[in-house]
Amino acid sequence: MAVVGKNVPHDSARGHVSGESLYVDDIAPARGEVLVDFLWSPHARARIRSADLDAARKVPGVVALLTHRDLHHNLFGPIYKDEILLAVDECTFRGQPIVVIAAENAEAIRKARAAIVIDYEPLEPILTIDQAIAAQSFFPDPRIIRRGDADAALANAEHILEGIFENKGQDHFYLESQAALAFPEEHGALTILSSTQNPTEVQEVIAHLLGLQMNQVVVETKRMGGAFGGKECQATHPAAMAALAAQKTRRPARIAYNKDDDMHATGKRHPFQNRYRVGFNSSGEIVAAQFDLYSDGGAYADLSPAVMGRAMTHVDNAYFIPNVEIRGTVCRTNMPPNTAFRGFGGPQGATTIESVMEEIAAVLKKDALDVRRANCYGIDSRNTTPYGQIVENNTLPRLFKELPERADYKRRLAEVKRFNESSETHLKGISTTAVKFGISFNTKFLNQANALVNVYLDGSVQVSTGATEMGQGVNTKIQQVVADELGIEPERVIVMVTSTEKNNNTSATAASSAADLNGGAAVDACRRIRERMAQVFRTSTAAKGEIVFADGQVWDAADLTKKMTFDDLVGIAYRSRVSLGERGFYATPRISWDWTTGGNPFLYFTMGVACSEVLIDRFTGEMKVLRSDVLMDIGRPINPGVDRGQITGAFIQGMGWLTTEDLQYGAQGELLSHSPTTYKIPNIHDLPEVFNVDWIEHDNPVNLYGSKAVGEPPLLMSISVWCAVKHALSFVSNGEVARLRVPATSEEILMRMSHSRAAVAQGVQR
Ligand code: LUZ
Ligand code: MOS
């Protein structure tokens, strides 16, 4: 009756569709509660000459107006402590909070906001990577990864390709906007209900900003309505504003951003500008490459250096590059601080080299799949990454063989060519791309977790970990693992609300690794409880063999007459005064990392290969995905249904970034596309018409029950869609390498096609 590997329903599945699941802002107002909101900077960069709050204070219903002066400290940040919560004398991005408003109702907040008078002196902002490079506005410590001699190998290469890959950002578009509820407790303590991936960070920052000890702040997270990285750091700001209001007014305080403010004020996926020089031979094999990556970090560092680190360790993606040089520079601009977003720089790195693969194929007039296969990481050789980690347990060659067969790639490629020769109205493209995603936080110390397992007198079990549930099903996976460890039904196990009171010093639920880390900690706790219970069983039955826990029973493997229910054994253990609670711990083994010497930043890699075919309207640039096939190595899934959902959802979310989600800004950096009417996330009609999602049977012996992390890696499978567009464009590019930006919106595609048509018409040499 093993539970791991079964489709146990998501623990919130019913609640999500019935509306029973509570999100922070669904919790009924407490007596005396104040509503909290904030006035944000309308300028990307401006000096605050003066602020007059007198008129706003007199607005009926206003309870408090709070500024940086009301904070004990104003400085925080996950990597560098460079970020301020409330602007002091200069605003450094549009959307930056300046005044926190606490009021009896929304009407009073609206009037107070209008009555605040701030005299700004607008300053010249830096709004783009180009402007940042021109001004040399960078965060500290540009990084470099180097192997072999790229310069020399490039000098001798048969072919050289140069280009720039550029991508725009992406809004997280979680359905539940940022929200928090703060309650004042006795002796100045606070309890915060926060929609955060990182309760510990919220606890730490609030304690610091408000002058409390961490043990005076309890942060609880029941669930999030989506997060995608957008609540790894930036849920902290609303929680801190609510906490400040609760501390100062001594009343419960609630904040919930509206969608527009959320889109204006929070950071996004990082825009990147990646320059590359690639040398290859006439069979398409890369002999050397130089990558110079620039990201837009925004006004504060946030997680940008770590995101850049992941971009740099994913620009190789599935491909071996013998001589390589990878530089990474994070630009400081006056945009909202860009932050974690599912994939965390990985997509920006991997799309760059997948784009290069299409370009090499175009130059050599080869099938891009053959080029990719020629460069794919090997099993016994050509298997070391630029940073020195060996790609162990490498299933990429197998995936590169099996997926194209399943997708009937060769035949369809020929069909695409025939179609493009005959159709005057449409264009098709097809591409097969890969993913190799490193699993582990690239900051070593974050790879730890603890878990609390309590067995109650009736044999039912509560588990608490630092993992937060954002719809991804981590609670269900932990429930399954605990059920199997104790040999009981999953219905006997409940995963409790995440709280800093039960689990201390936890890492963000991030890097796809929450089930790995927290599941590992829960296993540790269960095994120690089981060991004690087994000892009780031996004492009370004189059992001599191995003690088995399964099917809700406990028995002696050497003598099946010695058997009792798990519940009865719990009762005996309790009466024998044996502890039935345990705290487990997990620290990822084998990992090491150093920017100068390299190392093994990742415990293992999640891998996959995908093939997509697109149809483009030659007159409008409108694009449809005709078919996508995805084949992954996700180890042995703990919950196949949950994992299928993750692969499907991540693929579609990645498609959104790559094809339709177009962040548009005005001349002063004002976000113009700040609602669903102007920002196009994928909907049901954008699904590939044929969409096959599958995985291979393959064990991952280094991780929990042979499983692999699945949250982020499949997002990179959607790169096949973007590359299929690029492939389509190669048919109309007049012999030139087709360039394409992210997102490849209809406008972008149309522009690229028109450019080629104009070039053909005028005989222009580009
Ligand atoms: N967060 C982080 C992440 O702090 N380090 C990481 O490596 C990471 N990777 C993916 C997503 N979030
Ligand atoms: Mo993340 S991008 O919060 O795993």
Image (spheres, grey):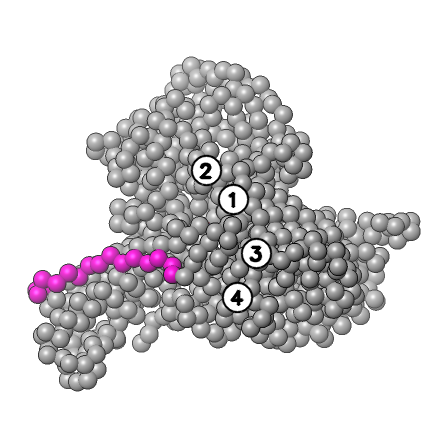
Q: Residues within 10 Å of mark 3 (few under 14, many from 20)?
A: many
- In depth, the one of 596 and 600 nearer the eye is 596
The residue that mark 2 highlights is 80
Does label 1 point to a residue whose CB lies under 8 Å from ligand 1? no
Question: Residue 726, percent across and down?
Answer: 72, 58
Gap in Å between the C-alphas at discs 2 and 3? 23 Å
Gap in Å between the C-alphas at discs 4 and 2? 31 Å
Q: Is residue 149 magenta?
A: no
The residue sitting at 51% across, 61% down in the picture is: 389
Q: Are marks 1 and 2 in contact (CB under 8 Å)?
A: yes
The residue sitting at 39% across, 22% down in the picture is: 69
Hey, what amino acid is under mark 2?
A: Tyr
Q: Are marks 3 and 1 in contact (CB under 8 Å)?
A: no
- Quadrant for the N terminus, please: bottom left
Question: Residue 245, percent across and down?
Answer: 35, 29
Residue 479 seen from this side: yes
The residue that mark 3 highlights is 314
Q: How many marks?
A: 4
The residue that mark 4 highlights is 391
Location of residue 27 with respect to 700 vertically, above or below: above
The residue that mark 1 highlights is 305
